[in-house]
Image (cartoon, grey):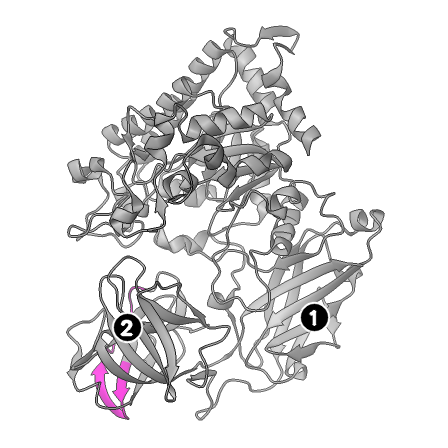
Amino acid sequence: MRALRCGLLVAVAASSITIGGVEAQQGGELSLEQLREMRRELAHKPRGIFANNDGCDCLYYPKDLEISVQNFLDRRTTALADSQVSTVAYCTISSGFSNFTHDTKVGTVLTREPADYGLLPNTRNATQPLIDLGSDCLQSVVDFCHANEMEVFWSMRMNDTHDVAWSPDKPYLLYPPLKEEHPEWLVGAYDARGPVGRWTSVEYALEEVRDLSFAYIDEICRNYDVDGVELDFFRHLCYFASVANGGVASDEEVAAMTDLMRRVRAMTEEVGRERGRPILIAMRVPDSTEFSREMGLDVEQWLEEGLLDILITSGYFRLNPWEYAVELGHRYGVAVYPCLTDSRVRGQTRFKRHSVEGYRGRAMNLWAAGADGIHTFNLFSPTSAIFRQIGDPAVMATEDKLYYATNVDGDPGRWLVGGARHQTVPVLTPAHAVSLRPGQPQSVPVWIGEDFALGREAGGVPTATLHLEMPGIERAEQVALSFNDHVIEDATFADGWLDCPLQVEWIERGRNVVDLAVNEEEAPGEGEWSFTWEATDRPQEPWYRDPGSERTEDALQDGAMLIADRGTVSGDYHYYRYVWAADPSEPVVVEARAKAISGGSFVILMNGVAQERLALYPDHIELFFNTDIRYDMDTTDDFHTYRIETMGEDLKVYVDGELRLDASGLYNKGGNGTRQLAFGAANSSAVGEALWQSVRARLASQSCRDLLVSVSYD
């Protein structure tokens, strides 16, 4: 690990460097040719792991911990000195576009306290105290990393919109004064939101916005001894009102963004020449040039013009195999560091993508694809084994791994209308299950980057197993399976999972294919339910519950479960959720037996395309997205059976067998790619209590909720 890092910093630490036969003095002014040659060499130095820190260690600092530089560094940085992390990209929040936690004179120093906005009351903001100590959060990280022979990039989220929680009657921690002063600089408004993106995004078509963006980057490069800047376009993907309103960026908008990137490159070259050391530019963007350009980001043009040094791709969704990004970057002589982020896949049960085994499998796929290194995002424990293993395939040679068909299942259509048309990789997770009907086999590709030769050389004996989650079947013989055309005949079934031993010789390093089909008619009949919960116990996996707060409660009592939300602070709501494979083209039935007590309680249905919420109030029921559809009744007098039936855009609600709400043709909005059933109490700004006896659902077809291959060594 140490040798890898020392090799990285040779060009920085030396007092003089010979490049192309020309000696360049460290600290002296470089010629443009010297700078560019040095930059190319630095860009292609091996880094292992390029780790992004989102800066929350400063903004949400423990209230009971003394604020000091050392205590701040110990939260996420100190332990990285003994890891495979060679580069830290530190984000000084940059949320809301203009809020920062470094000592900025161009933007706004974010000194607000989280607790004042109902957020994380056990924390405080360390921004100003660190500035007062003479070493703000960014300077502290720069000093530490350079003292430990590590690189530091400043990371700017080019249009972060965590401030979207703001509303006119409820201020929010991250919503900056800039947006209150210039609401016309936003792509939308609180009461005028486009179909995609987020309304609090600033409009990069405006010269004022581009000038500010440039000024933020320029200030860092001239005032901090950073080794590079990371321009994070993925967090969040909204830059033009034309896109947020359902279209694609115009040629003029694309050109304006490219001009901004040219300005940034020219500035970094100017500053780099003056200080005698380059400032590298890394960019995190979607892994499709077509998708990116429609968003307004002409990534291929930027590569052609040499406007970046390190290409970082992907995030909460991925559009192409990893080889796509590697080939793209290498075609233009740019180092490629694909991003591994927290997966945020809901409804996982037996295996977990966020496990160290899951990260090892994802990392091996990157190394097999030819990546130059690995970028990590939203991974913060500095003592994690992940930071000590995934940066070197040899270290992982005989370690256990999990290879999933899909690791991230975010919806590209949330940011670009029809964005999924650019997606060539499969999406198979509990929220995006494969539907199986008799006579209609399905093929699922799964990438396995395992280097079995490397493992055997290290003395390991590998074992591989295919795992499929299919909770609706009763025995293994109901499913026909093959792996790369090799028929699997000895599968076993237990607790909703099929386990299928694989011969290692069947596995290709790279793309593999699993074929599966239902052998018998397995769709639930009229009297059968796909899953049922009854109040003999709290819902168990694959159900999961919201974190809630001290103001929320659930308790079993007298054959029912009380779910209560008695608070109005952010995070005060309480639901149990089930990630399902509801298909808009098939009939879905949900029945909930409940008795309201006070306030509002809800049953929520989402099928990826549409969302609706059946609201139970003491004196009536109504729909959330169609509030004019209402039925007056006493929901507190007894337990009632609420039956919701959907088919396509039609939704109907029956109460104790009688049709009471008819939303035919209106179940067609709010889905945002999410597929989920939930029941519980209220929301952050409201309260509610109800007793629940049962919840059950019927889906039309059998499904495979998850698919992965595990590799272990003896």
Residue in the foreground of this view, choosing between 567 and 210: 567
Q: Residue at x 60, y 51 (%)?
A: 359
- Using the image, tell me which numbered label, if any, was put on residue 684: none
Q: Is residue 610 visible?
A: no
Residue 386, compared with residue 225, is above or below; it is below
User: Element at badge 1?
Assistant: strand
Where residue 144 sits in the image (x, y, percent)?
Answer: 53, 27
- Position of 527 with respect to 107 (left or right) is right
**Magenta stretch encompasses residue 664:** yes
Q: Residue at x 55, y 81 (%)?
A: 472
| Kind of residue sitting beneath label 2 | Arg
- Position of 210 with respect to 427 (left or right) is left
**Magenta stretch encompasses residue 638:** no
Where residue 94 sits in the image (x, y, percent)?
Answer: 35, 36
Figure quadrant of the N terminus: top right
Measured Cα–Cα span from mark 2 to mark 1? 41 Å
Residue 286, compared with residue 418, is above or below; it is above
Q: Residue at x 40, y 63 (%)?
A: 547
Where residue 667 sits in the image (x, y, percent)?
Answer: 28, 72
- Position of 156 with respect to 634 (left or right) is right
Residue in the foreground of this view, choosing between 113 and 243: 113
- Position of 396 with respect to 123 (left or right) is right
Of circles 2 and 1, the one toward us is 2
Residue in the foreground of this view, choosing between 494 and 145: 145
The total of numbered circles placed on residues is: 2
- Using the image, tell me which numbered label, if any, was put on residue 482: 1
Question: Which residue was labeled with disc 2?
Answer: 613
| Kind of residue sitting beneath label 1 | Ser
Span highlighted in magenta in the image: 652-670
Where residue 485 sits in the image (x, y, percent)?
Answer: 72, 67
User: Element at badge 2?
Assistant: strand
